[in-house]
Amino acid sequence: MLGRPDIDSDGSNAVVLVSLDFGHSDYAESLEELKQLAESANLRVVAVVEGKRARPDSALYAGSGKVEEIALVVSQAEAPLVIFNHELSPAQERNLEQKVKCRVIDRTSLILDIFAQRAHSHEGKLQVELAQLERLSTRLIRGWTHLERQKGGIGLRGPGETQLETDRRLLGKRVKVLKEKLAKLKQQRDIQRRARSRANVMSVSLVGYTNAGKSTLFNRLTHAHAYAADQLFATLDTTTRKIFIEGAGPVVISDTVGFIKHLPHTLVDAFRATLEETIRADLLLHVVDNSSPGRDEQIAEVNKVLKEIGADDVPQILVLNKIDVKGMSPGLDRDEYDRITQVKLSAMTGEGIDLLRQALAEYNAKLTSVVEKPEQTEFLILNSGH
């Protein structure tokens, strides 16, 4: 993996955040998420510079006056890093760095850095490196010949090549190697998934907005010890466990990476292999932070990403988590066909977990009856709305 070339290169974790309001309704929420992302990356926010614009400036993204303000704040705070809450072009990053006299990155680079910190499995690390390299290949502005020294060797500089051509060739070779390795891992997962399918074991995936409490719920259901923390992207690698549900028998449950607004497409593509656990699942447990003021927008964002990865037709049960925060009681809701559509619970306290187990048992019973009675398949598909 490339490591972390963008953040903390001089040992300081001070950062200045920049967020411009273009009139979008989710501006305040987006800025709050940027602060949480910075904290998740172990950065110390020393200042936040805000401004309003009708549209981004082509050269600096922010106007020249606002950039001068950012430069002054950076100088006073002695911050080595500025993070924009937006997508910057390579040229805009270069121009901004010249003006503010420090490293400038955007929201996507910050998310990539967090992913680099959190990936622990072999596959997760490969996927992060692939996303990093594919992003770097579009914005090469300095030499990356340290890739030559990586294990296995990627090749030496050819005669007559410019530095940029060499860097692109090295990156291209490494990207090809990573894609081949990930393809092999995908084949292994497909074999494991087919084995589970032959054994008629129901497959369930936990999905939801980042920090909704998926890993806490996963641990509660499986008695596992998956990493769970009150921070964005606490879970990156998919963790799978088999549990026994009374009335349902063995069930395979997978905990997946959380979604977020403006998730970079490079990451959606890079993690498509991991998210295939979601695509292939029999049922999705869509975990929602019921205490969040942006709950409905977060639900919509998750469903949007599910559609992007081809999992929008997988049946799901909405799990309204963190009811303890607002002193709510556990409960469940059914639709007109008497199917459980929502479960209210607290993964932290365990309240309502029995209702979720009941929902899984009921769904598995209906799934089994459809397998045994093929003529009912059409009914299930027609009525498997979320």
Image (cartoon, grey):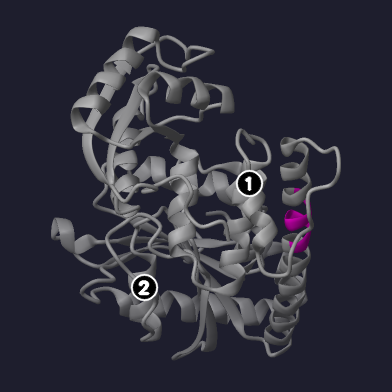
Q: Residue furthest front?
A: 159
Determine whether, in the image, residue 88 is placed left or right of residue 164: left
* Rendered residue at 48%/48% (across/down): 5
* Rendered residue at 40%/57% (across/down): 233
Q: What type is the residue that disc 2 sits on?
A: Tyr
Q: Residue furthest left?
A: 327
Mark nearest the camera among 2 and 1 is 1
Determine whether, in the image, residue 161 is placed left or right of residue 309: right
Residue 227's tag is 2
Q: Is residue 254 visible?
A: yes
Residue 129's tag is none
- Label 2 to label 1: alpha-carbon separation: 33 Å
Determine whether, in the image, residue 60 is placed left or right of residue 176: left
Question: Crowding at label 1, few (<14), some or many (≥20) Cα neighbours within 10 Å?
Answer: some
Say if 365 sits above or below 246 in the image: above
* Rendered residue at 47%/77% (across/down): 360
In the image, residue 143 lies at what x, y percent?
A: 63, 41
Q: Earlier in the sequence, mark 2 or mark 1?
A: 1
Tell me the chief SS of the magenta region.
helix
Residue 271 is inside the magenta segment: no
Q: Magenta stretch: give its range.
A: 172-177
Q: What type is the residue that disc 1 sits on?
A: Trp
* Rendered residue at 36%/54% (across/down): 232
